[in-house]
Image (tube, rainbow, N blue to C red):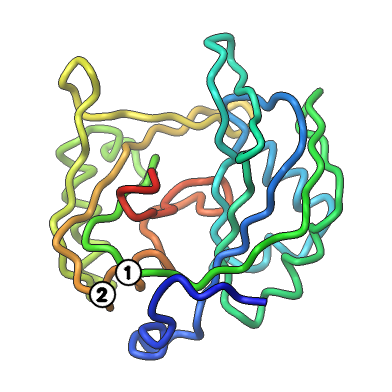
Amino acid sequence: MIASVGTASLNAMNGFEPFVELNFLVQGKTLPADHGYGLYAAMVHLIPEIRLHSEIGILTIPGFADKQGKILLTEQSCLRIRVPISKIPLVYRFAGKRISIGKHEIQICIPKVYTLRPSETLRARIVTIKGKEYTQPEAFLEAAKRQLTKLGISGEVSIPLDRERNPYRKTIKIQHFTVVGFTTEVSGLNDEDSIKLQQLGIGGKRHMGCGFFLPIKEV
């Protein structure tokens, strides 16, 4: 059953198969703070076909940081996966499964399914763009603008500032490598472009929590 929380018809306006978001509550105690790669690897172990679908976006699971490299899960912690409607049966197979991420084990519950809703401002916790030059904020912003233009999306892209008033730099670890990215905000979006950006994202590593844009009030 799909809970209507937005304007689903905008998907058709974009010329794409409609996307939905599956929100799976998870049960467990802790996870590594940086668990994007580990989560993806565990999911692929259960359902290998996931790796064949680059259009699927997977958001890392939120919790409270313990300042020791872990997050503490809460009753609201959930796994969010965005997929075209035709891929619902594929990702629904995670419901009821237990997965291990290192020493940490979680139970994935039955999901709720939501349509995407437009928002004038969207933010992704981390966007990564391949290339050493794009680990610098100026070059990163220019590359992000080019990707938006290529997608036909009009909006102002920026990097929020951290507490020290520096561009908000983020990293994810993939096996033995550290990938650098930035928290990214896109504002001034019309409804059609907002839905398109939530569907397609920008940058790489979308299976690992990158390029997953949320309405600003949900971040």
Q: Quadrant of residue 38?
A: top right
Residue 196 is left or right of residue 45, and the answer is: left
Q: Secondary structure at mark 2?
A: helix
Amino acid carrying label 2: it is Asp
Mark 2 surroundings within 10 Å by alpha-carbon count, few (fewer than 14), some (14 through 19), many (20 or more): some
**Mark 2–mark 1 CB contact (< 8 Å):** yes
Q: Secondary structure at mark 1?
A: loop
Residue 168 is left or right of residue 124, and the answer is: left
Amino acid carrying label 1: it is Pro
Q: Which mark is residue 191?
A: 2
Give the residue at the far top of this rendering.
Answer: 68
Distance (Cα) linking label 2 and label 1: 5 Å
Residue 65 in the image: state x and y as whole percent. 53, 19
Residue 163 is left or right of residue 34, and the answer is: left
Q: Quadrant of residue 127?
A: top left
Q: Nearer the viewer, residue 197 or 2?
A: 2
Check disc 1 and report the residue beneath it: 118
Above-or-below relation of 9 to 161: below
Which residue is drawn at the image coordinates 38% and 54% (left, top)? 213
Residue 107 in the image: state x and y as whole percent. 81, 42
Residue 53 in the image: state x and y as whole percent. 63, 68
